[in-house]
Image (tube, rainbow, N blue to C red):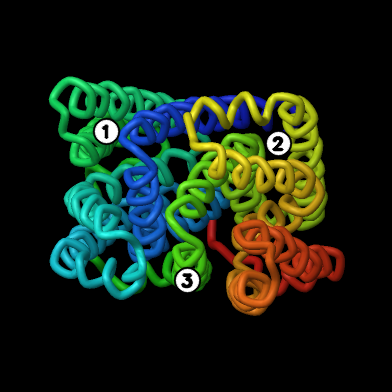
Amino acid sequence: MYTRKDLLRLFIPALMEQLLSTAIGVVNTMMVSGLGAFAVSAVGIVDSINIVAMNVFMAVSTGATVVISQHLGADNRKAASRTAAQSVSSVVLLSALTGLGLYLFGEQIINILFGNAEQIVKSAAKTYLICSAVSYPFLGMFNVFTGILRANNNFRASMIAAVASNIVNVLVGAVCIFYLKLGVLGAGIGMISARFFGALILMHPLFTDNRINISKQSYRITLNILKPVLYIGVPAGLDSLIFNGGKLLVQTFITSLGTAALAANTIAGSMNNIINIPGNAVAIVSVSVIGYYAGAGLHEDLRKMIKKLTLYAMILLGGVSLAFFPFVESFLKLYTPPDDVLKMALHVTYLTLICIPVFWPAGFIVSACLRSTGDSVFVTMVSISSMWLVRVFGGYVLVRYTALGLMGIWIAWCFDWVTRGVPYCGRVLSRRYEKHLPHIET
């Protein structure tokens, strides 16, 4: 079904989207870092809160991508179109409600989770959090539009929208930060503008798609249409919510290490995103590809494709790590960090360069593939267990009872990739996921 050429045709737009979006995001972080370590720390705090909150509506987007891919694999375009239309309604509603909740209670959330942070950090975080809340409806639309188009193998549209919106983010942010002197508020205005622009761009390809037509479908939410979406999306959302909630809790451990550790963690996380660009691109492609195979009933080809995608991710990430290793310090200095921040970020980045190619694909490429077969509950159970036992509890122990500091957090982080990857690979080898494959009428 999918030849190597077909996979490459999907992978290149996904890679370019991840590459350019991440690069522009790094530039944005660098602009904020010019305001001082407090601004970098504030943005890092809010981003960790955002990742948790966004799971409320991104769960539906994830489920929609899988279910629409399965319907298209079974050549049931009508069901795919109905699912797409109602997914849009659900995500817009949920994202607006989530943004409202964050707007109303954001200050209390910051004080509860990051009460030990310096006042200047908390004040800047509150400003950035309000901007994030305002942007949520646009982000929700962007995510669900992107998911629908990717399900139909239209990765080019999402690439163009992501790149264009991030260029808007940098341009508007630069004007607001450096010319209008708005500080962190300027970065927030850039983010709102980018998310609005991105959603606007995707409307045209979405409403003119020749395989998924949502313009003539009912947007009234009905359970029988959304039930398959929620069956995939709710466990995925719960997994992501608890996963990122655990990361947020780990962030509070880092807060206790001081502002320098917070800034180093934000910079190291930004660099980690750069290193992992090919892996994220493969994960994006795998959702649509495996969903299509599942819907088409091609079980043996599906199993081979899971192994192939995982191997491709390992090779690509290994190549990036080898190429990146000699230049790590030079890249980190672009953030203009103080010496103590640079030292911590450097150690963490070296660790992830070694571990990502070996352990990350089994933990995240295989899990994305398993979700697309419908085996979402198993993935969620493994992910939650590994997150809380290894990353959260292990990170706490290493920070509390050793002198590793920030490095202890990231050692637990890397070990978490191992403890989730092993059972996922075992699931594929045993073929137990096959009992969850959909039975879709054509």
Q: Residue 81: x, y in percent?
A: 36, 49
Residue 270 appears left or right of 393? left
- Can residue 131 be seen from the camera position used here? yes
Residue ID for mark 3: 249
Look at discs 1 and 3 and give the one toward the viewer. 3
Helix, strand or loop for disc 2: loop
Q: In which image quadrant can residue 314 be found? A: top right
Q: Earlier in the sequence, mark 3 or mark 2?
A: 2
Q: Residue at x 76, y 26 (%)?
A: 326
Query: From the image, which quarter does the C terminus lie in?
Result: bottom right
Helix, strand or loop for disc 3: helix
Q: What's the mark number on residue 194? A: 1
Between 166 and 92, the residue placed more toward the observer is 166
Q: What's the mark number on residue 2? A: 2
- Can residue 383 be seen from the camera position used here? no
Question: Would you say the residues marked 2 and 1 are in contact, meaning their CB atoms lie under 8 Å apart?
Answer: no
In the depicted structure, whether residue 309 falls above or below residue 397? above
Between 163 and 41, the residue placed more toward the observer is 41
Q: Label 2 amino acid?
A: Tyr
Q: In which image quadrant can residue 179 be found? A: top left
In the depicted structure, whether residue 209 falls above or below residue 38? above
Question: Would you say the residues marked 3 and 2 are in contact, meaning their CB atoms lie under 8 Å apart?
Answer: no
Q: Residue at x 36, y 61 (%)?
A: 49
Q: Earlier in the sequence, mark 2 or mark 1?
A: 2
Residue 240 appears left or right of 375? left
Helix, strand or loop for disc 1: helix
Residue 417 appears left or right of 336? right
Q: Residues within 10 Å of mark 2 (few under 14, many from 20)?
A: few
Q: Residues within 10 Å of mark 3 (few under 14, many from 20)?
A: some
